[in-house]
Each structure stands twice: as structure tokens, then as C-alpha cells.
Amino acid sequence: MNTHSLTGRITRLQDHLSSQYVDFDRETTTDRLQSLYSDFSKLKILNPYGYDANVNYWRAVILDCNLHGYLTTKDYSCFIDKDELADLFYRPQKGKPLSLNHVIEDMTEKTHDLITQKDYEKRYPIQASNPSSSKLTWLQWIYYTPYHWLIPETSAHLYIVLPTVQEYAKIIIQQHYSKPLCSSLDNLFTFLEFREEYGTIPCHQETIVQLSDLDIWVVLRYLHHCYGVAIADAFKTFGAATSSSTAIKFPDRNEAVQVIARITDNDKAIINLKTACSTLHKQVDELQLKSEEFLKLTREYSEKNQKPQAVYMLRKKKQIEEILDRRLKTLETMETILLKIETSQNDLQVVEAFNMGANTLRSLLSDKGTVEQTMDKLQDTLEDQKQVEEAMTIGNEEISNQTIGMTNEELENELDSMITADKRPPSRRETLTQPIDTESELLRLQTVLSSLNHPPSSAYQRRTKTKELA
């Protein structure tokens, strides 16, 4: 994303601006855009409100575009380059904005959104997590100053965008703790594992920002200072780069803010094992490629009837296969050790949970007299409750009888009389008429309607005969 040419970066930025901001539409030029691209530095005295409005507008645009990966340097995503900032906002018919230097000055001195790398490292230092650091001489201490040689120094015209770093750190924390942590080692990473897991940040419109190693170190400093992520330098293993031996550990899920994670010697040993396994995997892949290459050459020489060369290549292939076999056995041993360490730590957590539960249960049941006393109190309470229920039942019956003025026996006799009366057959006067035959009634109604629409033919014939006689 950051390796595009300047022209490509300008195009991407202008596309984003035109889709998100009305004032940056490609087809029209608003009065607001005219003011933003003009030299509005004089407004600081003549119209402070207008000056602050333009500065705040540019500040919002710069922070938004940098956060979503549209306004970065060529190599780094968390930085902006003061010298090329105006070039990136170039518009064909408008030119470059003339007052961005005042915006940068405001963002560095007033809002502190932009900060140089040197000031950033002073504000967010990485504390050395080395148990033996107190025993080092002053020369060794200078040499072992944590990660100074890992982080390259940038030019003075490059600024770290602090709100972007804060947002990226928040995204990484949310991603890490949203995953189900199934093992005690899920919080422990090498630098390469951390880069592979969190080196890409999801951003606007399904785009992603690719973090460089320097970006990751910048974010790690903030994670260490504000979220308690521990960083330590483990012992360098064979074939591993310096950054590969760096141990990174997230705090436990409930300690993300309050407590800084602590990297123990066991954690460093695990990091070294992981690094060694990663190195062995690379060596195995390289040896496999060499073995296939020698096999291919053996067949080619054999087809050309060059037997000595074919035998030589076959011998080289056998040597490579022996080395490959030893590397695979070593890799299997190391991965088995890692698996056993992970399993043992998980088992220890289970045992600790069992111990905690057993201690809690033992403390609850340790005083036998207290348990018996509690059961006696419970029995007394149940008896009191039973007496209260009986008293309420008797009282309710008395109140009911007084209200009605009749006993239960009289009420039952009246109920029997009502039931007997309901069972008597109804009298003739109360007998309902026979149900109406719906079909017969409809036929009768249809006949009447037909007679109204079509008069009888006999009547029509009588009227005709009368006319003829007349």
C-alpha cells in the first residue's frame, strides 16, 4: 500500500476525499475549498474564528486520511511527511494548499497529534524486562539498551500520528481479547508471530493498512505503556534474527489495563523454542528444494548418458536427505517439548482451579457446629412458617363465613337445588321453534324473485286476446 508512486498515492487520496467530503468533489470547487487552499495565515489576526475553523478542518482531514491508510509516507503507515504533505493534496485546477505548515505547527504544539520519533520514544519508553540488568556494567547496559538497534531513526520531517497509533493499539487489543484463548501460551508471541497476527489493520471500505516493522514497534511502545503488554529480549537462538528473539506478552484478560504483564525465564525459553522451530521449518523447506533440484539434475544427466555426473548428483541428494532427516527429527523433538510445556501449564491451571474450589468448600464446611446450628435455625423457621399458614387458613374461613352469613352446609344445599333445577326439561312455552330449513327457504325466495322479473305467460295471453276482440 505504501510502496506506490507519488502519483498513485495522490490519486488514491483524491478518490477518498471526493467520496467522503463534499468540499473535495472533483467536479466543483466550493467556497470552503477556496479558503482551505488559500494562504489563510493572515486570518489568525484578522479573523481568529475563521483561522481556527480552517485549521480544525484540515486537522480532521489529515487524521482521518492517515488512519484509513490514504495519507501515509512511502514506507510507514503511522507517519506523515511534512515535506510531501502539500504535494499529496495537489488538485489539477487548484494547485497545492498554501497553509498546511500552519496546520502542522498547530498539530505539533497545540493539539500534540503529531510527534517526532525521538519525543515519542521519550514519552513511551520500553522498560527493560531483564532480571539480571542490575548486575550489568555501564558499558554492557549501554549495549543492552532495549531495542535501540532494532528501531531505525527517521528524518526530522517525519511525524508520528498519535491518534492513529492509539486507534491501531485499540484495534489490536480488541482483536486479541475477542479470540477464545484456549492455551496459557496464547498471550505469548515472538515478534514475527505478532507481525503475522496483527501486522495488518482493517480500515475503511474493506481496505487494510500494512504495518512496517517500525510501525509495529511504535504501536508496541504504546501497548506497553498504556495496556500493559510486556516486551523482553530473549536469548538469541541459532539462525534467528535479532527481532525474532523478542518476547511479547499480553496481560491476562482481566489485567489488560491495571497490571503490566511479566515475562519470566520460562517465557523466554518458550520464545527461544518457538524461534528455533521456525528456523528449522525454513531449513527443512530449503533442504527439500535442494533435494528436488538434485533429483532433477540426476535425471537430466542420466538421460544424456552422463553417468558420472548423475552418480555425483545422486550422492549429493543422499547427503541432503540425511541432513533433512536429522533436521526433521530435531524439529519433531522441539515441537513435542513445546506441546508438553503447553499441556503442563494448562494442567497446572486446572489443578489450581481444583485447589481453589477445594479450599473454598473446605472453609465452608470446616465448622461442623455452624452447619448444625444453621440446620436447627432452618427447622425452627419451617415450623414457624407452618404455624403461620395454619392460623391464616382458620382466619380466612371465619372471615368468609361472617361475610356471607351462611355456613358451608347451607351453601352446598343451595348449590344442589340449582343443579336440580337446571336438569328439569323445559316447558312447552319455552320450547324453541323448529330450526329453519335454509335450503327450502332459499328456494322459496328464488321462486318469488323469478316471478317478479318474468310475469306469468297466461296473464300476458289474456291481455293479448282482449286487444284482438276490441
Image (cartoon, helix red, strand yellow):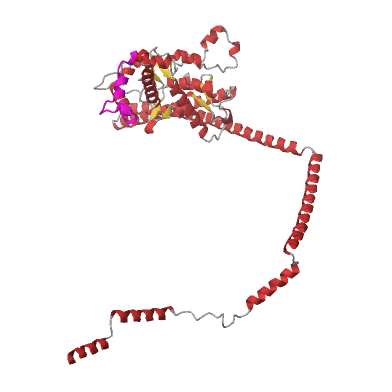
Q: Is residue 133 above or below residue 188?
A: above
Is 383 covered by the magenta stretch?
A: no
Is 34 covered by the magenta stretch?
A: yes
Q: Residue at (79%, 50%) from the top-left corner?
A: 384
Residue 391 horizontal/vertical position (percent)? 78, 55
Which stretch appears magenta? Answer: 14-42
Q: Residue at (52%, 32%) from the top-left corner?
A: 177
* 95 left or right of 168 in image: left
Q: Is residue 430 above or below residue 46?
A: below
Residue 136 vs residue 37, the one in the foreground: 37
Looking at the image, the residue that sits furthest to the bottom is 469
Q: Quadrant of the C terminus?
A: bottom left
Q: How many marks?
A: 0
Residue 48 vs residue 125, the one in the foreground: 48
Residue 21 vs residue 129, the one in the foreground: 21
* 177 left or right of 107 in image: right
Q: Quadrant of the N terminus?
A: top left
* 243 left or right of 89 in image: right
- Which of the 4 image quadrants contains residue 286? top left
Label the magenta part by its dominant secondary structure: helix
Residue 198 vs residue 55, the one in the foreground: 55
Looking at the image, the residue that sits furthest to the front is 470
For the question of whether residue 239 can be seen, the reply is no
Residue 100 horizontal/vertical position (percent)? 34, 16
Residue 154 horizontal/vertical position (percent)? 40, 14
For the question of whether residue 375 can be seen, the reply is yes
Q: Is residue 235 above or below residue 350?
A: above
Residue 330 horizontal/vertical position (percent)? 51, 28
